[in-house]
Image (spheres, rainbow, N blue to C red):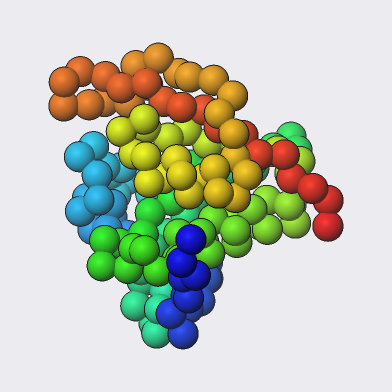
Amino acid sequence: MATVVRPAGTQVRALRSEDLDTISAIEVAAYDFPWSLGVFNDCLRAGHSCWVLSVDGVIAGYGILSMGAGEAHVLNLCIAAVWRSQGLGRHLLRRLLDIARWNGAERVFLEVRPSNPLAKTLYESVGFAEIGRRPRYYPARDGREDAIVMALDLLPL
């Protein structure tokens, strides 16, 4: 496997309300059934752990994590198309896992579409494993699509 070097000037920082239009545009460009701007705003207002990844000050992606009762759930993780295949998704995912661990999570969950094998491969590469399926979870062009439920047990620091 080729080594991927993350671009210089990469930073992960807390999402701010002024970032919402930018991350919403990344979401709309990436998915057939994107989250609305309102969903992102609700996540921010609800106090979910919301982060952006930037390269030289330009937002390249975002991640949203919910936490509670010793568990965390990756709600959304996306890297803009022009920034993919540079290790940024892995970098952001690892930061979300660090944040979950720092906040006392012992296990992290997520759902991924079977039609998104690149995301599934990313999650597996950091140790996530499939633990089940949610039938007809996601909207799809031809009706509904199952979700693959994945989990990762976090080791203490």
- Judged left or right of residue 128, residue 26 is left
Q: Quadrant of residue 7?
A: bottom left
Between 82 and 24, which is closer to the camera in this rendering?
82
The percent coordinates of residue 59 (x first, y second) are 36, 71
Q: Quadrant of residue 94?
A: bottom right
- Judged left or right of residue 31, residue 42 is right
Residue drawn at 39 percent across, 84 percent down: 56
Q: Is residue 20 above or below residue 127?
A: below
Residue 157 visible in image: yes
- Please identify the residue farthest to the right as the structure is shown: 156
Residue drawn at 34 percent across, 39 percent down: 116
The percent coordinates of residue 44 (x first, y second) are 47, 53
The percent coordinates of residue 122 (x first, y second) are 48, 49
Residue 44 visible in image: no
The percent coordinates of residue 108 (x first, y second) are 64, 40
- Judged left or right of residue 152, residue 106 is right
- Please identify the residue farthest to the top as the structure is shown: 135
